[in-house]
């Protein structure tokens, strides 16, 4: 479809969400807000402000687990449902951005990491289901501090970037533009790591 005319950015209103929206000439809206009908592409940024609170598994109640591990996946599921409707007629593409800590885990963050990985599994399932409709769904994983406020020591758990000179916010924008452009119709359900080489997973 060429580069999208209108890109809608949802979630993590602030930080990376605002940066992406500015680059695409739009405004970031919340995950639970109405999605405009004219979206040629949709970016969903998953994160929290403030960032996740460490909590030992043994100390968590069932409601606490649900609030963190299950609620985010349910909210993103609803976003993806709406995104499919608005992009289907335009053959648009969807990009989901999550923190890379979901790939490697974090101390006392099983509740948060489980929710993030549930979102990634959900996006990959959507990619498989919607491929016949020519809708691609891909993921970009980024350092926690780009999508969560007050990450502090949690961000350092993942490791430091190999490329210290990288402007990661700009790199995420460029990666999102590529994934939204339809330049690679064979690319769907993929996870692209944009973190300056901190995680380096396949």
Image (cartoon, helix red, strand yellow):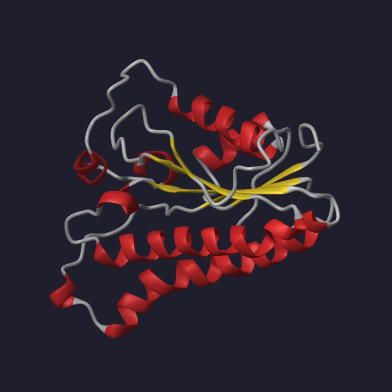
Q: Is residue 68 above or below residue 170?
A: below
Q: Position of residue 107 (x, y in %)?
A: 17, 56
Residue 123, image quadrant: bottom right
Q: Is residue 126 above or below residue 38?
A: below
Q: Observer-nearest residue: 72 or 120?
A: 120
Q: Is residue 143 above or below residue 88?
A: above
Q: Position of residue 169 (x, y in %)?
A: 49, 29
Q: How many marks?
A: 0
Residue 200, image quadrant: top left
In the orientation shown, which residue stands out farthest toward the top?
Answer: 165
Q: Residue at x 31, y 76 (%)?
A: 65
Q: Residue at x 86, y 56 (%)?
A: 89
Res 54 seen here: yes
Q: Observer-nearest residue: 137 or 97?
A: 137
Q: Position of residue 90 (x, y in %)?
A: 84, 50
Q: Residue at x 78, y 54 (%)?
A: 87
Left or right relative to 16: residue 166: left
Q: Position of residue 180 (x, y in %)?
A: 68, 39
Quadrant for the C terminus, please: top left
Q: Residue at x 65, y 29 (%)?
A: 23
Left or right relative to 22: residue 69: left
Left or right relative to 168: residue 153: left
Q: Observer-nearest residue: 61 or 90?
A: 90
In the orientation shown, which residue stands out farthest toward the bottom?
Answer: 62
Quadrant for the N terminus, please: top right
Res 34 seen here: no
């Amino acid at each position: 479809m060429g580069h999208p005319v209108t890109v809608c950015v949802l979630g993590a209103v602030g930080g990376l969400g605002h940066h992406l929206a500015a680059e695409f000439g739009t405004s970031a809206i919340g995950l639970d807000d109405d999605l405009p009908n004219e979206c040629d592409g949709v970016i969903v940024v998953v994160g929290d402000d403030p960032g996740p609170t460490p909590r030992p598994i043994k100390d968590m109640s069932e409601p606490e687990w649900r609030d963190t591990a299950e609620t985010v996946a349910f909210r993103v599921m609803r976003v993806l449902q709406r995104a499919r409707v608005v992009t289907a007629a335009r053959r648009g593409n969807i990009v989901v951005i999550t923190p890379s800590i979901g790939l490697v885990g974090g101390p006392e963050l099983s509740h948060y990491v489980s929710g993030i990985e549930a979102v990634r599994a959900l996006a990959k399932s959507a990619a498989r289901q919607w491929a016949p409709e020519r809708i691609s769904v891909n993921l970009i994983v980024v350092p926690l501090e780009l999508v969560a406020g007050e990450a502090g020591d949690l961000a350092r758990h993942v490791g430091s970037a190999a490329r210290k000179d990288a402007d990661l916010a700009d790199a995420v924008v460029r990666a999102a533009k590529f994934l939204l452009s339809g330049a690679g119709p064979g690319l769907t359900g993929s996870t692209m790591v944009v973190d300056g080489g901190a995680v380096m997973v396949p």
